[in-house]
Image (cartoon, grey):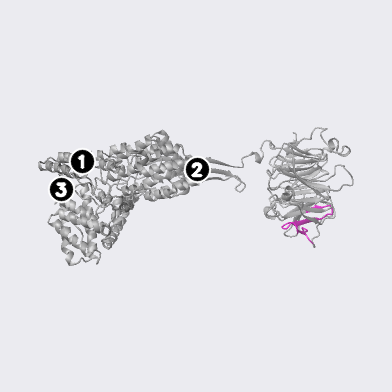
Amino acid sequence: MAPIRTIPDMGAVVAWSALGPKDVIACGTKDSGGVGFDDYGGSLSLYSLFQEDTPKLLASVQTPSRFSSLEWSAMNSKPTSPTGLLAGGMVDGTVCLWDPSLLLSSSPSPLLASISRHTGPCTSLSFNPNPNSNHLLSTAGSDSQVYVMSLDRPDTPSVFIPAPPPNTTVHQNPCLQTSWNSRVPHILASSDTSGLTIVWDLRQKKPWCTLLSPEKSPTSSLCWNPAEGLHLITASTENDVIKLYDLRASTTMPLATLEGHKGGVLDLDWCEEDERFLVSAGNDNRTVIWDLHNCKEVLEIPLEEEGTGGGFGGIGGGRAGRKRCEVGWGGRGVISTVSFDRKVEVHNVMGVGGQKPAKWMKKGKGVSLEWGGKRVVWGGKEDGGKIVTIDTVVERSDLKEGAEIFEGHVQNKTFIEYCQRKMEKGGGKVWEFMSMIFHDNARERLVQYLGFDAGKIGELARSVEAEGVGVKEKDMAADVEESVKNALLVGDFEVAVDCCFRNGHLSDALVLSSCGGATLWQATQKRYFQSESRSYLKIVSAVINHNLMDYVEASDVGKWGETLAVLSTYAKSEEFPTLCEALGAKLDAGGDKASACLTYLCALNIEKAVEFWTAELESAPERALGLQEFVEKVTVFSQGEERDWGEVDKLFREYADMLANQGMPEVALKYVKGKGEEVDILRERINKAIAGGAVNQQPVQQPVTQQQQQQQQQQQQQQHNPYAQQQQQHNPYGQQQQQQQQQQQQQQQQQQQQQQQQQQQQQQQQQQPPAAAGGLPPGWIAMQDPTSGRTYYANQQTGQTTWDPPVAPVAVPPPAPAPTQSLPTTPQHPSVQQAPSGGSAGTPQNLANKYGDGFVSSASNPQLAAQYGNVGTANPYNGAARPAGANVAGSSSGQPVALGQDGSLIEQRGEIPKEFEPMVESLKSITSSLTACTLNGSEKKQLQECTKGCDILFQRLATPNAIDPDTIAKTQTLVLALVAKDYGTAGQMSQQMANTVWKDHKDWLKGMKFLIQLAGKKL
C-alpha cells in the first residue's frame, strides 16, 4: 500500500490543520539533513496535500532553532485569524507561536510570541481539545518541568505549573510527553523517562493519580480516549506492550494490553473520528492500526520498497533508516508518518475496519426529502444517532407566502383588494380589468379606464370653438324654398326632403323627414349618414340602426379601446358579450392577443381568457411563479365555478402538488380538480398528509354534534348571502330597535341551544350515534393510518379528520321565534345590483351575476342610461314625446331606503315642516300605488330608485336650508303635475332641475325622473 502523498527530504515534526482547509499540513524541521554540523537553524513550512498531484508548498519561514514538537490549535488568536494558532517546541527550550494566516499571506512577521521557560529541549506540546479551553497549552521539557500557558493574549501569555508548592509530587526525570484529557478540561497527564505518568488536576492544583511502569522504562507515548475521559493509553520505547488503563478501576493494572511490536513503541495516536482505532509505530519497523474493541491488529501500513529512501546514507540508509518515528491521524481515514530517512508520508486507510466498518464509512447522519415537503433527518452527535426528526421544509418561501395571501383573500371574498394588490405590484392590465368587473359601476369604470372621462370630455367640448361659430346655414334659394313649400302643401314630404338634400339643406331634410312617417325618417337618416363622412356619425348610425356588430367588424384594431368604449356605453346586455367576443376575435386575428384577452374578460368568456393565459404560462420565465399567477387569475375570474376544465385541471393539480410540497396540503386539496385514477391518487396523498399532520400535531377530533352542525350551516348561509349582509350594513333606520331585537333573539337562541344540548347529551349517554346506514356523509372518506393501522375519516372539502365515524347532519326544523314585545322589524329592500335568478350553471349569464352590474347595457337600462347620459332614439310616431338627452355625469350612490312590508315609505324621525306635508303625502301615495301594480324586473328596480329618491328628498326637507326655495317650488310643481297626471309638465320640471341643480341634488332627482316615467306607464 503505497502512500498517497510524500514530502521528500523533510525530517520534521508534523501537525494537521485544525481550522480552514483540512488538507493543509505543517512541518517543522528537527534535523539539518547532514548539511553541516554547525547548522542549528530550522524552518516551518505549510503544505497543501491535495490541491495538486504533489504536495504544494504554501508558505515557509526560517526559525533560529530546530523543532522537537509541533501542535496546531483551533483557537483564533485574533478575529482576523481564521486558521488557528501554531505552537512549536524548540530544541533550545523556547516555545514559539505563529499565526498561520500571516504565514499564508507572506507577512514579514508571522511570529506572535516566543516564550522561554524550559532550560532544555521542549519535548512535547499539547493544546486543550475542549472548545472552551483551547487557549491552554501544556509543555513538557527535558528539564523535568511541565508548564501550562494561557494564550488568551498570545503576545503576552501567562505561564503556571500544574501543582505549585507545597505539592511534592513532581517529575524528577526528563519529561517526554504531555496530553490533555479529551472530556475534562482541567485534567492533564505527563510522563517522563523513568516510566512515571502523573495525571494533574489543575482545579485542585495537585496530582489526581499516578501511573508507574514496573520496568521503569520511559513512557514515550501518552493518549486519552477521545470519547471516554477515564481511558488512558501508554507506551514505551523499551517495552513491546501497549497498555490501556481505566483510571476508575485501577492505576496499577491495565484494563487491556496490545501486543505485537518487537523492541518497543516509538509513537502512537488515538483516532478522534472513531475511538475504536489506534495507530502505533514500533522499533520493529512496523506501523500498525489496532481495533481496541478486540485488541487485535486490523491493518499494517507497509514500508516502501528498498532503494526509494533518501537521506544521508551513513545514517539513514537501509531498512532501519526507513523506520517511522512519528504517526498521527489527519482526519477520516488519513494517517501521516515521519521516518528516519527524512520523509513525510500520507496514507489512505479509509477501508480499515475488518468485520465492522469504520464510523466514517457509515451514514452517521443523513437527510431525505419526501413528498409533501417533508424532511427526514437522522443521526448526529447530539442524539447519538438514535433520533429521527421529521419536519417540513419550505424550499420556495415566496411561493408559500403568495399562496397564503391569496388564500386569505379567497376565504374573505376580498377579490377587489387582491386585484388592487396585484396592480400595485405591476401585475398588468388583466388585474385592472378584473378589478373593474367586481365593482357595481363596471361599465363606467371601464370607459374611464379606457381614457374617456365624461367630466373632462365635457369641459374640453365647452372650451373648443372653431372659426365661423354662430354662422347660420346658407339661405335657401327662392325657387328651392318655393318647391319645398309646394311639396308640403300637397303633403309630399318625400319630395320636400329630396329637394333639401339636393340643394345642401341637410338639417331641413332631417326635420321634414320626422313628419313624413317612420319609413321616410329611417331612409333620410340612412341618406344623411351616407352623405356625411364625420367619424362620430358612424357611432350614431350604429347605435340608431342597432347595428353595432358591423361597427365592430369595420373598426380599426389600433383603436380597439375606442370600440370597446362604444360597446360599453351603447350595447344591450344580451348582445354585449357577443360583441366583445367579436372584437376579441378581430384582435386575436390581428396578432394582438393581450388586448384580445382583455376583451374576452369583458365578455366574461373564461374559456378564451384561459387559452391566452395557458399560452402565457408556457413562455413564463419561471414555471412555479407563472403557474401560481395562472391559478390566481382563473380562480378569481371563475369565482370557484365548478366545470370540466380539461387541460386546465392538470395545471391546477400541478399547482396543488407544488403547494403540498411546500407544506400546505390543506390549501393544495382545494386545487385538486378533475376525475380519474391520477386525480384520486393525488387527492389521497394530500389527505394522508393532512391526516398525518393532524395525528402528529393535534388532538383527536371528536365528531361534530348536531347542534354544532346547525350552527355551522347557519354561519355558512350567512356568509354566502351577501344581500343579507348588505341589508344589515346599509340600514340607517331602526338600529336601536334592531339591537334590542337581536339581544332578545340571542337570549332565546341561547336558552334553546342549552335545552337541545342537554337533550343531546342524554341521548349520547344512552347510545353513541353510528355512521349513516347508507355510508359516510357527502365529502367524507375512510382511510387507514399507516402508523397505527386504525381507520380514520377525512373530509375532502374541509380537511377535517376524526377517528370516529362522522355523523350526517339531521334536518331539524328551526325553533319557533318567541313573540316580540312592541317593536316591529324593518325589512330592507334588495340592493339594486342584486343578481337576477335563473340561468344555467356555467353560462356567461350566470357568471355575470358574480360581478358588479355584470356589464349591464346602459342603452337597455334606464337607471344606467341616467348614469352615462345616453338615451335611445324614440319613434316620433309612437304617441309620446321623444325624451330629452340627459347631462353626462357620474353615478352617485345615495343612501339606501327603508320600506315597509307593503312597499310604502316608513315615517322619518326628523320633523318635516307642515307646509311640505302635502307634497310628502302625495309622493307616498304615488309610490304606494306603483307598489300595487304588476311590475317586471327592470320596473321593480326603477321603483326602488324612486323610493330611494323620495326618502332622500324627505331627509333634505327635514333639514333646514338643505334645498333652496326655487328648487322646492319646482319640486312642488312637479308633484302637483304627477297628481294631476300631467306627466309632460312633470318631465319639464325634472329636466329644468337636472340642468340647473343636478350637481347638488342628483341623488334624489334621479329617483324623480324614474318616478315620472314609471307613473306615466302604470298609473
Up-down relation of residue 940 to residue 259 (above or below):
below
For this view, does 184 lie left or right of residue 382? right
Mark 3 to mark 2: distance in Å? 73 Å
Outermost residue, front side = 478
Quadrant showing the N terminus: top right
The residue mark sitting in front, 1 or 3, is 1
Residue in view at x 57 percent, y 45 percent:
387
In the rendered image, residue 143 lying in the magenta stretch gets the answer yes
Pointer 2 local density, CA inside 10 Å: few below 14, some 14–19, many at least 20: many
Can the viewer see residue 452 in this picture?
yes
For this view, does 507 lie left or right of residue 318? left
Q: Amino acid at mark 3?
A: Ala
Q: Earlier in the sequence, mark 1 or mark 2?
A: 2
Q: Amino acid at mark 1?
A: Asn
What SS does tag 3 mark?
loop
Region rendered in magenta: 139-164
Residue 880 badge = 3
Mark 2 highlights which residue? 373
Q: Amino acid at mark 2?
A: Gly
Q: Position of residue 888 (x, y in %)?
A: 28, 52
**Camera-nearest residue between 169 and 123:** 123
Q: Earlier in the sequence, mark 3 or mark 2?
A: 2
For this view, does 162 lie left or right of residue 494? right
